[in-house]
Amino acid sequence: MLITLDERDARPIYQQIVSQVKEQIQRGDLQPGDELPPVRELAGALGINLHTVRGAYGRLRDQGIIDLRLGRRARISQARRAPASVVEAETALGGHLRELVSEAFLLGLSANELHSMLDSHLGNVNVGASTPDSNMKEKR
């Protein structure tokens, strides 16, 4: 697992860590059962406070992305057995999507330009995973 911090990124460090772990899972670089570095080790490697890493791991645990057990290393959780329902997806993603749409509007992007950007990023989804389109259509 490789985590790099971007000082120009406006997001807090813990969010950068959370995002990069999720991206590595999405790309297939991290698989269910893979171990993450211990909190102290990652904090030392990144030159940050261990509480920042602990907070990132806590968020990943709360989202079901990793398993944390006292005295054991954090591991990537098993993949979801079934895709999220539309209601669950809206609950989890609705706020992010509204913010994304607002940001795109403020940047002057058209709906088509935003769709193109999303399509481009969706093209990077791990080939072994089911497609987002098929998951959402099945649940409607």
Image: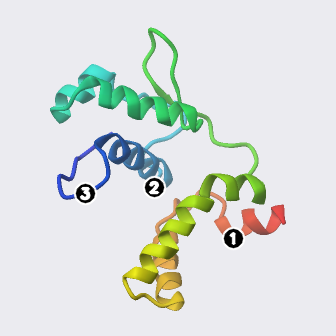
Q: Is residue 16 left or right of residue 60?
A: left
Q: Is residue 42 shown above or below 6?
A: above
Q: Quadrant of residue 37?
A: top left
Of labels 3 and 1, earlier in sequence is: 3
Query: Residue at the spot x=48%, y=74% of the render?
Result: 102
Query: Mark on residue 27?
Result: 2
Whether residue 114 is visible here, answered yes or no, is: yes
**Residue under pointer 3:** 9
Q: Is residue 21 left or right of residue 10?
A: right
Gap between marks 2 and 3, in whole Å? 21 Å
What is the crowding at mark 3: few (fewer than 14 residues within 10 Å), some, or many (at least 20)?
Answer: few
Query: Residue at the spot x=44%, y=42% of the render?
Result: 30
**Residue under pointer 1:** 133
Provide residue 62's location: percent of width, then percent of height: 56, 33
Determine the secondary structure under disc 3: loop
Query: Residue at the spot x=27%, y=56% of the render?
Result: 10
Mark 3–mark 1 contact, CB under 8 Å? no
Determine the secondary structure under disc 2: helix
Of labels 1 and 2, earlier in sequence is: 2
Closer to us: mark 2 or mark 3? Answer: 3
Closer to us: mark 3 or mark 1? Answer: 3
- Spot the residue most to the top: 71
Q: Is residue 101 shown above or below 27?
A: below
- Tell me the quadrant of the picture where the C terminus can be found: bottom right
What is the crowding at mark 2: few (fewer than 14 residues within 10 Å), some, or many (at least 20)?
Answer: some
What amino acid is found at the position of numbered circle 1 in the picture? Asp
Pick whichever, 104 or 63, lies toward us: 104
Q: Is residue 98 left or right of residue 38?
A: right
What is the crowding at mark 1: few (fewer than 14 residues within 10 Å), some, or many (at least 20)?
Answer: few
Mark 1–mark 2 contact, CB under 8 Å? no
Query: Residue at the spot x=19%, y=35% of the render?
Result: 46
